[in-house]
Amino acid sequence: MTTTSIPENNPILNSRRQHRYCVIMCGGIGSRFWPYSREERPKQFLDFFGTGRSLLAMTVDRFLPIVPIENIIIVTNSRYAPLVAKQLPDLPAENILLEPARRNTAPCIAWASYHILARDPEASIVVAPSDHLIMREREFEQAITSGLDFVENQDALLTLGIKPTRPETGYGYIQVGQAVQGCNNILKVKTFTEKPDRDLARVFVESREFFWNSGIFIWRANTIVSALHRHAPEVAAVMEHGIGLFNTPAEKSFIDENFPSCQAISIDYAVMEKASNVYVECVDLGWSDLGTWGSLYEISPKNRDANVTQNCAVMAYNSTGNIFALPSDKLVVVDSLKDYIIADSGDVLLICPKSEEQRIKLMVNDVKAAHGDRYL
């Protein structure tokens, strides 16, 4: 869909912005980035690039040209309320929704949608994770604006599909179908596939029919609530008990009592893979979900030996393709090391081949079993 540029003082633009919201999901613990990402301070609160801005703060910055700050909603775990408030001092306190328990993305999105719908029956919503990186932010702004224009004119659930650059096995894939007439880059979704193996991922990329599932969604508030009723009735039923309480002082008590009973399920499984009105906007934004050390390695500047150093001092001999993440006051000296992750975070040192990084979540589980929460 082609979006016409509207001056900022245009009443049409101001009216649209008034009804546009952004929900940022900020409750994960980022275990694949352990030991840098810890339960007390997960990766979305970290400044990976030495800019003075965490991934969460960068995400908010990215949406400010699209929606006003008072329409940005953060959904996070109760224990992270002080971190969110400290990093986003301009965000209204009532815009921080605190989950009493982790229940995956469907209950998170359901709560935020019911909250916003009670506040604004005409609302349209962008849902985004708090820990992604977008290199081409102007193109991102245009894509989100075009997506909002699309869903505001029809009953549609829209997701952003990222043009794949490699046969990645850590992402979900979206197979595209017929293009929507009159809309640039928006197509009907044919299938979703979760994290294929290497051979299947290679087939997907070579076919040019598949895009990475970004986890960024756009819809009207009433559209997603209707879809939850149809496809995730157990989640919707919990929220329906709160009608009349959302956007009131009684909302928090209702959520604290009822949210933990929600089914723990992702929005992809609960709704997107079942609904018939799902579309994808295919984009190329310089996107990374920063879900793994490998993804951080891919987007980071490298020295002549293809090593990456994260704000630390390194002397490397006969060593290539490594990523080093250590405290700035520590020197690491290595010899004959190739394609490894070396991450030191206070009381934990991780040394792991990049090719085995999918096992880090299993390592975290083993650490928990052996030592409790001490090193998490």
Image: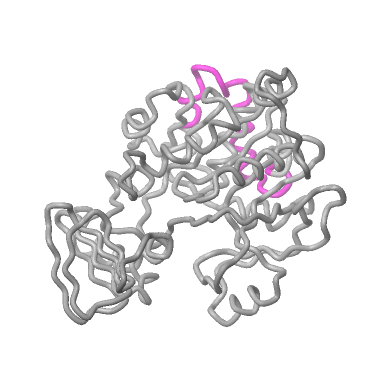
* 73 lies above or below 348: above
Q: Is residue 132 magenta?
A: no
Q: Residue at x 72, y 46 (%)?
A: 157
- Residue located farthest toward the right when viewing the structure as drawn: 181
Coloration mode: one colour
Q: Residue at x 75, y 59 (%)?
A: 189
Where is residue 354, by image quadrant? bottom left
- Residue located farthest toward the front when viewing the structure as drawn: 304
Q: Main secondary structure of the magenta part?
A: helix
* Lateral position of residue 162 relative to residue 280, left or right: left
* 228 lies above or below 339: above
Where residue 30 sits: x, y (%)?
A: 37, 54
* Lateral position of residue 314 relative to residue 60, left or right: left
Where residue 12 sits: x, y (%)?
A: 75, 22
* Lateral position of residue 113 relative to residue 15, left or right: left
Q: Quadrant of the C terminus?
A: bottom left
Q: Is residue 229 magenta?
A: yes
Instruction: Compare residues 104 and 62 and report the one nearer the observer.
Output: 62
- Range of the magenta residues? 228-255
Q: Residue at x 80, y 41 (%)?
A: 155
Q: Quadrant of the N terminus?
A: top right
Where residue 104 sits: x, y (%)?
A: 50, 49
